[in-house]
């Protein structure tokens, strides 16, 4: 077990002793403990985090999905100023920068998706971040935590809607932010930034209609003009009413 700060040392030891081999990884970063669990121990370990004396994480504060496709890829040269950075940001074919017809085929990337929950013990004033990677990136599936913490209900629906993560045992797993006829999951990194259809209300038909999108794939990167010695003597444009 890694070294922990004095604030989290006893909590980390308690988690390790309680969950034993079910702990895949336990780390601390900037004062935040992160516990990683396998899918087969996702529910039973969370139940112990809630019920075990000294842990007592009675509140699920947040649950979200994460897509690690392209994680760590760098499109910008940030160590120093660069004359090519602007064009690279606009023109480079990074995640999501394609139209629906030319979207890439899905790949089975290990640990591409994860579900992250943030827990709070209101009695002990303790916080814990718990993460789990669904095994199949083509069809990410994880057991629902609704029977452990009821607040997981709408959070799991949101993760399903935006990332396509299916929560087995959820009684009402429907889209919650997008339209029921929406195609795809918009927070996935391989979802086109321009979407796939245009949705608008048609006054003549008096209903919502779906049409092919006419937006060109693009990324808006603002040019930053700094007023320093490098620009002295240059003519600046002024705006008039």
Image (cartoon, rainbow, N blue to C red):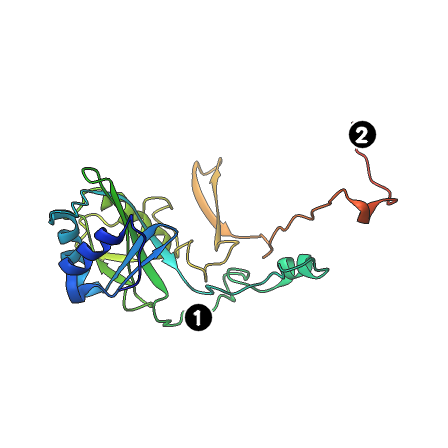
> At which x and y percent is residue 223?
69, 48
Q: Residue at x 13, y 53 (%)?
A: 48
In the rendered image, the quadrant that contains the N terminus is: bottom left
Residue appearing at x 43%, y 41% in the figure = 208
In the figure, 18 relative to 241: above or below?
below
Q: Check residue 1 in the rendering and tell me which mark sits there, or answer none.
A: none
| Circle 2 SS class | loop
Is 26 rendered above or below residue 108? Answer: above
Rendering coords of residue 142 (x, y %): 23, 60
Q: Which residue is mark 1?
A: 105
User: Which of the 4 quarters of the picture holds residue 217?
Assistant: bottom right
Q: Residues within 10 Å of mark 1 (few under 14, many from 20)?
A: few
Mark identifier at residue 240:
2
Q: Which of pointers 1 and 2 lies earlier in the amino acid sequence?
A: 1
Q: Quadrant of the C terminus?
A: top right
Q: CA distance from mark 1 to mark 2?
A: 50 Å
- SS for dot 1: loop
Relative to 235, say whether 133 is above or below: below
Task: From the viewer's side, name the closer residue of 143 and 21.
Answer: 21
Residue at 65% across, 62% down: 88
Q: Are marks 1 and 2 in contact (CB under 8 Å)?
A: no
């Amino acid at each position: 077990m890694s070294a922990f700060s004095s604030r989290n040392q006893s909590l980390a030891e308690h988690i390790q002793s309680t969950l034993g081999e079910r702990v895949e990884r336990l780390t601390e970063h900037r004062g935040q403990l992160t516990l990683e669990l396998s899918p087969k121990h996702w529910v039973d370990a969370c139940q112990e985090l809630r019920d075990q004396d000294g842990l007592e994480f009675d509140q699920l504060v947040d649950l979200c999905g994460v897509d690690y496709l392209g994680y760590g890829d760098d499109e910008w040269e940030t160590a120093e100023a660069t004359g090519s950075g602007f064009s690279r940001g606009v023109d480079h074919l990074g995640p999501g920068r394609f139209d629906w017809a030319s979207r890439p085929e899905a790949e089975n990337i290990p640990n591409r998706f994860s579900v992250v929950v943030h827990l709070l013990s209101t009695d002990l004033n303790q916080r814990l971040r718990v993460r789990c990677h669904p095994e199949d990136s083509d069809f990410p599936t994880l057991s629902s935590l609704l029977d452990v913490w009821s607040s997981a209900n709408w959070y799991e629906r949101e993760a399903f809607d935006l990332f396509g993560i299916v929560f087995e045992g959820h009684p009402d797993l429907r889209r919650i932010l997008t339209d029921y006829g929406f195609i795809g999951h918009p927070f996935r990194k391989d979802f086109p930034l321009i979407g796939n259809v245009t949705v608008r209300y048609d006054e003549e038909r008096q209903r919502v209609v779906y049409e092919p999108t006419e937006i060109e794939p693009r990324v808006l990167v603002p040019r930053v003009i700094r007023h320093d010695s490098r620009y002295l003597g240059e003519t600046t444009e002024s705006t008039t009413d």
